[in-house]
Amino acid sequence: MEQRSSAVQNAAALVNLPPLLDEFGVSLGAVLTGTGLSANDLQPGRFIPYAAFMEVLDRAAVLTDCDSIGLQLGLRHGLAAMGPLGVAMRSAATLGEALADFAAFQITNSTGAAVYLHRADGEVMLGYGVYDRAHAASRHVYDAVLAAGTVLLSELTKGAVRPTEFEFIRTAPRDTLPWQSLGAPIRFGQARSCIFLSRAALSFPLPTADLQARTQALADISRRLGTAPWGWTGRTRHAIFALMLDGRSKMPDVARFLDVHPRSLRRELARDGTRFETIKDDVRHAVSRELLSLTSLPVGEIAETLDFATPNAFNRAFRRWSGASPTAWRDRQRSAVYSEELPKPHSSDGTG
């Protein structure tokens, strides 16, 4: 874990981890060692540091020696674990309305990453990305979330709507068989992690639509947002990430997304002691590290993903953030990972 931040995650995402670990003969206590968490923290409605959430997933993968542990955990997730947001989604009139709720209000369950819904041509992308940089990039969180997204789609539509394709930031695992269970073509090593759907799928009427339940759930969410500790800084960070991947991360774009005038947004951020440009830099820095660590994408493509005007502009910004060029930083990260994976030497005299 590299640094602490205020980003949090609803521990409901880890509720099904203990029985999964049991299947591998691994204790929950061993996985939680050094994370600052206890078994009592893994309850729906409790919030844990987002960095600790990622660390738990990474430790679970190492101790079970299972690269698909995040995938398996995500496949055990469901709407019931999502609190009022799950109720709002289940009671929506259409799948499109439910997914729009997911993207708009996911911040009530996590302030370290964002769900986004992008429409392009005849397709829809339901994606997820981490913008908290308090922990080294983790491929397992993307496995968990996209698997969970697949379950949510099946639960909402009773299996009638299925993904048409998946993209993962992570590189291809040695054994892709577990991922094939998702039921659609998969591309690894991409600039984003997302589920593709046909645009027509958004019009699918949900069999569990319930206007009264939905109204109550949205009122619960509104109360939560009204007292949320993350304020305008957290909302802006969330919005920047969601819009950046669509090439719309300038101040007017973000203000429009948040339904506030740009001048008002600047004033609110100033009251929080920060600036729009500072938050945007932080999000770009976090996402650039994810892409440099988890993919082999060319630096120019990463610059475009981060909504930089040119690769040179990205290079200058990354040097300012990290003290090294993107290429040098990536090489250093890979050297460190390679060193950690080398077999440890054993001395012949029994002393080491």
Image: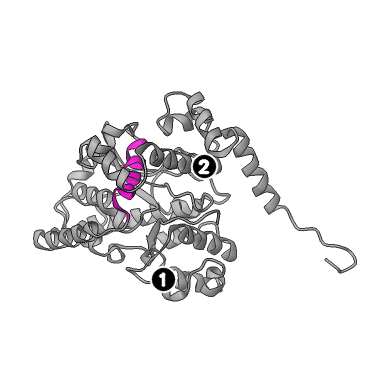
| Image height of 247 relative to 209, above or below | above
Do we see residue 279 in this rendering?
yes
Question: What residue does disc 2 label?
Answer: 289
Q: Residue furthest right?
A: 349
Q: Look at 76% across and 58% down and name the residue there.
A: 344
How many numbered marks, from 0 up?
Answer: 2
Q: Look at 38% across and 36% down and name the residue there.
A: 277
Do we see residue 90 in this rendering?
no
In front of the other: 19 or 15: 15
Check disc 1 and give the amino acid type.
Leu
Rendering coords of residue 172 (x, y %)? 53, 45
| Image height of 348 relative to 244, above or below | below
Question: What residue does disc 1 label?
Answer: 42
- Secondary element at image label 2: helix
Report the quarter where the C terminus lies.
bottom right
Q: Look at 53% across and 29% down and name the residue there.
A: 315
In front of the other: 215 or 119: 215
Q: Is residue 280 left or right of residue 81?
A: right
In front of the other: 32 or 230: 230
Q: Residues within 10 Å of mark 2 (few under 14, many from 20)?
A: many
In front of the other: 333 or 344: 333
Magenta segment, which residues?
A: 230-245
Whether residue 238 appears in magenta in the rendering, the answer is yes
